[in-house]
């Protein structure tokens, strides 16, 4: 179990503290009256999805002696209304082609699709993952 503490600081900002001591701040987007001075809570979900996919693939790569340094992701967060919620999180994963033999690419993609954050998303959130090898 991991414990996180969250304090509302007013003006649509929160201060988050991880049990290991790391901290971050969230802020509401400007269209909701925030300053957009930090990631919004829904931005953190999008960022968590992309980083979870990369981390999960990276751990798989380490077990298979694949150097996946330089692998990257982009994620677009599309909100839907009403009610205001995340509607779509398309993710593009860019993998160094030379690092992954073609015979292992389907396995790599399956690993990415099974990351814990992707598996935790509500089924109504469209979260396609596209892989490109460059």
Image (cartoon, rainbow, N blue to C red):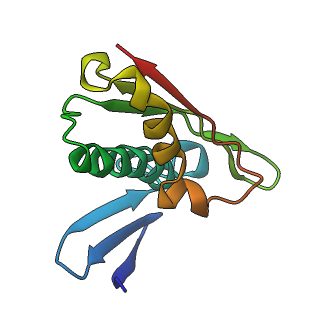
Image-quadrant location for residue 64: top left
Q: Is residue 41 visible?
A: no
Across and down, in percent, residue 89 comes to 60, 40
Q: Is residue 51 left or right of residue 65?
A: right
Which residue is nearer to you in this view: 98 or 51? 98
Point 27% across, 63% down: residue: 24
Across and down, in percent, residue 119 comes to 59, 59
Q: Is residue 6 left or right of residue 117?
A: left
Which residue is nearer to you in this view: 80 or 53? 53
- In the rendered view, would you say 66 is above or below 37? above
Point 40% across, 21% down: residue: 102
Q: Is residue 61 visible?
A: yes
Point 47% across, 44% down: residue: 112
Quadrant where the image shows the C terminus: top left
Across and down, in percent, residue 94 comes to 38, 24
Point 29% across, 30% down: residue: 71
């Amino acid at each position: 179990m991991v414990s996180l503490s969250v304090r509302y600081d007013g003006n649509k900002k929160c201060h988050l503290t991880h049990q290991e001591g790391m901290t971050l701040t969230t802020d509401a987007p400007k269209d909701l009256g925030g300053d957009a001075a930090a990631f919004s809570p829904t931005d953190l979900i999008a960022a968590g999805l992309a980083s979870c996919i990369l981390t999960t693939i990276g751990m798989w790569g380490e077990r298979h002696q694949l150097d996946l340094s330089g692998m990257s992701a982009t994620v677009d967060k599309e909100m839907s209304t009403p009610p205001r919620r995340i509607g779509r999180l398309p993710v593009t994963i860019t993998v160094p082609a030379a690092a992954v033999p073609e015979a292992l690419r389907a396995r790599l993609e399956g690993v990415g699709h099974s990351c814990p954050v992707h598996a935790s998303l509500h089924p109504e959130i469209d979260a396609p993952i596209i892989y490109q090898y460059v």
